């Protein structure tokens, strides 16, 4: 009995000493090297490499899949180009499953197109120390090794994957839907243009805001007051500003016919120069080039609220009888419209900014909502060729409404009522769009 | 005629089509082209500022010469323009703090340049002043708009009242479900209406762009059909 007790004590002491020695060797962590070693066999060539599709080159996509037991591990990716090694990413969560090796603004030749690259993954339970990172890119590292270790942990090294080359694409397939839509609308536009040329009558509905242009100019003339035309704070590259300039041409012609004065305070010098040309041509067209004064189309400032203050001041001094706000407006919209209202001017506004529309509706007499502004040039000119664009827009709107309805029905039957067939169709529609 | 009308139309058409193609081509050649066009735009814009300065000086000197009402303000504009340009150029090229330190030994150098000083302590407060007017204008515009004159106006009034009350803590105090109601109004009926407008706007923009590229819309060149 005593002998057995001594043997038991001896065994316990030995076991304790062994486990203590193991803990000392692993730096006091709870690492179980046997568990990691058992995964070593399974790492293999774990990285799937591919060129990033639809990009301008200089990018490699690295994907991996690991079993759940390794999902909390950290992953470090090493790239090899000939004998040169580089750390692409370190201490990523292995569960992330993907990383991209791409060029950046700081390093535009990080990944060179046409060059062969090889990638290796290193898995670790804890964050990788700088010493190990340096070791991983040094020449003496044997890439065939399956594990390396430091005082803290064991690192699993995958087989090298590759080669992979990056290349630039000539077409972005992700934008195929946009291209198809552009082709459809261009086709419709050209079709209706052809029909208009052949004499087909195209209809455009009444836009009261544009019908009021003549009334506004006439009223201003009767009162002996000038007209103020504000193009907002857009640039000449903005379509709403171009639409505003088009309407300016028609308004200026009316102004010249009524022999009154138009003031155009500008935010951008290019817009100012363009507006000067537009007004000058309109006055010439109306047969009154003598009435044109270049200084009536003036530059204010390119500061949003400075511009608002300048225009407000001008409104209060000049007291225009009509104020046109046509273009791109942001936070200054209500400041301008309310000042115009306070001086009793008839106000016709138009913008594509949905956030500013309620302000214009509240403060102005007439508001051109979104597309009405784009249609203004067509409406004012009543040119059949120009009307073709409105007809093409309407057909496109019908197509969009049909797609929306299909999406709505599929959305209810698929994700809503969980009917698998419709769910698949719904996902397909989302993917296409 | 060719220089004034045909050439600009050809240039607009060419660059319009090239920019559309560029949108679909991710190749570096396409990106280089796009960046080059952007650089050209910056250069052209820089020159147009000279025209802006010329316009400002011409307008205000005319006002001063003719002694029109409020001509004194024009004088303030021209003096401010001159001073800002002066300190802007000196601040960038000659570091005036060093010059000032030589002239005035007691002068302490500052990390804020004189031009930045005018921006931070003059322009920004003035901008904020004008921006703060918006609160008062919103109140006056809302007061005029929210009158139950018709069914539509009443709908607007009721919705606005619900949204306004729901957006302040008082709304939640009155009824806990208020924030959810507001969220629903903004997320569904409001968003649906906005998207309807936006679809029309985008189609209008595409149509206008096509008209410019094809040379049908040429009003932006000044006059003519």
Image (cartoon, coloured by chain):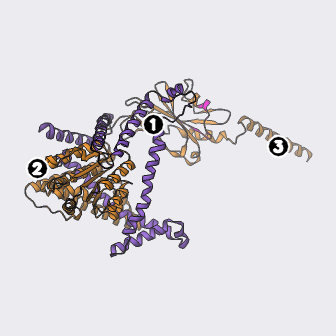
Chain colours: A orange, B purple
- Chain ID for label 3? A
> Residue A17: x and y, percent?
80, 38
Q: Is A250 left or right of B181, judged from the image as shown?
A: left
What number is the disc on residue B115? Answer: 1
User: What is the chain letter for disc 1?
Assistant: B
Camera-side residue of A7 and A234: A234
Q: Which mark is residue A12?
A: 3
The first of marks 2 and 3 along the sequence is: 3
Q: Are marks 2 and 1 in contact (CB under 8 Å)?
A: no
Residue A224, horizontal then vertical, whole percent: 21, 58
- Would residue A144 appear left or right of A175 to someone viewing this image? right
Q: How many marks?
A: 3
Using the image as rendered, state which of residue B176 and residue A86 is in the foreground.
B176
How many neighbours does mark 2 have within 10 angstroms: few (below 14), some (14-19), or many (20 or more)? few
* Magenta stretch holds residue A126: yes
User: Which residue is located at x 19 percent, y 48 percent?
Assistant: A279
Q: Of A341 and B202, which appears nearest the observer?
A: A341
Marks 2/1: CA–CA distance: 48 Å
Write the start and end of the magenta stretch as one range.
A121-132
Q: CA distance from mark 2 to mark 3?
A: 114 Å
Q: Secondary structure at mark 2?
A: loop
């Amino acid at each position: 009995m005593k002998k057995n007790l001594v043997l038991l004590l001896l065994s316990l002491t030995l076991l304790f000493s062994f486990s203590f020695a193991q803990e000392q060797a692993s730096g006091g962590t709870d690492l179980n090297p046997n568990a990691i070693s058992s995964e070593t066999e399974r790492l293999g060539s774990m990285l799937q490499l591919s060129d990033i599709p639809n990009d301008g080159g200089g990018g490699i996509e690295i994907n991996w899949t690991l079993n759940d037991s390794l999902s909390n591990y950290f992953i470090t990716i090493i790239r090899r180009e000939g004998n040169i090694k580089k750390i692409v990413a370190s201490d990523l969560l292995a569960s992330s499953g993907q990383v991209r090796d791409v060029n950046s603004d700081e390093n535009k030749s990080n990944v060179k197109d046409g060059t062969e690259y090889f990638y290796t993954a290193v898995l670790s339970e804890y964050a990788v120390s700088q010493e190990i990172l340096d070791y991983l890119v040094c020449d003496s590292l044997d890439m065939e090794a399956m594990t390396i270790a430091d005082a803290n942990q064991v690192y699993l090294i995958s087989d090298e994957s590759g080669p992979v080359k990056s290349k630039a694409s000539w077409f972005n397939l992700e934008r195929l839907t946009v291209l198809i839509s552009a082709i459809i609308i261009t086709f419709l536009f050209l079709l209706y243009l052809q029909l208009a040329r052949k004499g087909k009558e195209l209809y455009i509905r009444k836009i009261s805001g544009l019908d009021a242009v003549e009334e506004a100019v006439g009223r201003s003339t009767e009162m002996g007051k000038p007209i103020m035309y504000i193009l907002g704070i857009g640039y000449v590259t903005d379509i709403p500003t171009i639409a505003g300039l088009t309407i300016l041409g028609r308004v200026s012609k009316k102004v010249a016919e009524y022999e009154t004065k138009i003031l155009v305070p500008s935010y951008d010098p290019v817009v100012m120069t363009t507006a000067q040309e537009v007004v000058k041509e309109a006055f010439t067209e109306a047969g009154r080039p003598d009435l044109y004064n270049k200084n009536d189309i003036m530059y204010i400032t390119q500061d949003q609220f400075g511009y608002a203050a300048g225009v407000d001041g001008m409104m209060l001094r000049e007291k225009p009888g009509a104020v046109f706000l046509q273009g791109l407006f942001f936070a200054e919209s209500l400041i301008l419209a309310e000042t115009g209202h306070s001086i009793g001017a008839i106000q016709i506004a138009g913008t594509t900014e949905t956030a500013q529309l309620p302000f214009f509706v509240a403060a102005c007499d007439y508001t051109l909502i979104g597309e009405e502004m784009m249609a203004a040039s067509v409406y004012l000119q009543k040119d059949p060729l120009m009307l073709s664009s409105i007809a093409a827009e309407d057909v496109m709107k019908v197509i969009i409404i049909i797609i929306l309805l299909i999406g709505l029905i599929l959305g209810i039957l698929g994700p809503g009522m969980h009917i698998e067939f419709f769910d698949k169709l719904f996902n397909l529609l989302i993917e296409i769009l | 005629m060719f220089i004034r009308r045909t050439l600009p139309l050809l240039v607009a058409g060419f660059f319009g089509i090239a920019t559309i193609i560029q949108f679909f081509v991710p190749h570096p050649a396409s990106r280089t082209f796009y960046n080059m066009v952007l650089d050209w735009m910056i250069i052209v814009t820089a020159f147009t500022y000279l025209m802006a300065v010329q316009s400002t000086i011409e307008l205000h000197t005319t006002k001063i010469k003719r002694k029109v009402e409020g001509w004194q303000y024009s004088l303030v504009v021209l003096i401010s323009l001159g001073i800002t340009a002066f300190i802007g150029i000196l601040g960038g090229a000659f570091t005036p703090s060093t010059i000032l330190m030589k002239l005035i030994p007691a002068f302490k150098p500052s990390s804020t340049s004189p031009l930045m000083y005018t921006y931070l302590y003059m322009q920004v407060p003035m901008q904020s002043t004008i921006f703060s007017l918006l609160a008062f204008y919103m109140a006056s515009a809302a007061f005029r708009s929210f009158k139950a004159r018709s069914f539509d106006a009443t709908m607007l009034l009721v919705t606005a009242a619900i949204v306004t009350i729901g957006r302040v803590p008082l709304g939640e105090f009155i009824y806990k479900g208020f924030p959810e109601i507001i969220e629903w109004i903004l997320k569904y009926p409001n968003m649906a209406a906005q998207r309807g407008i936006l679809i029309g706007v985008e189609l209008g923009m595409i149509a206008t762009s096509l008209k410019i590229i094809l040379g049908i819309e040429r009003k932006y060149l000044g006059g003519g059909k």
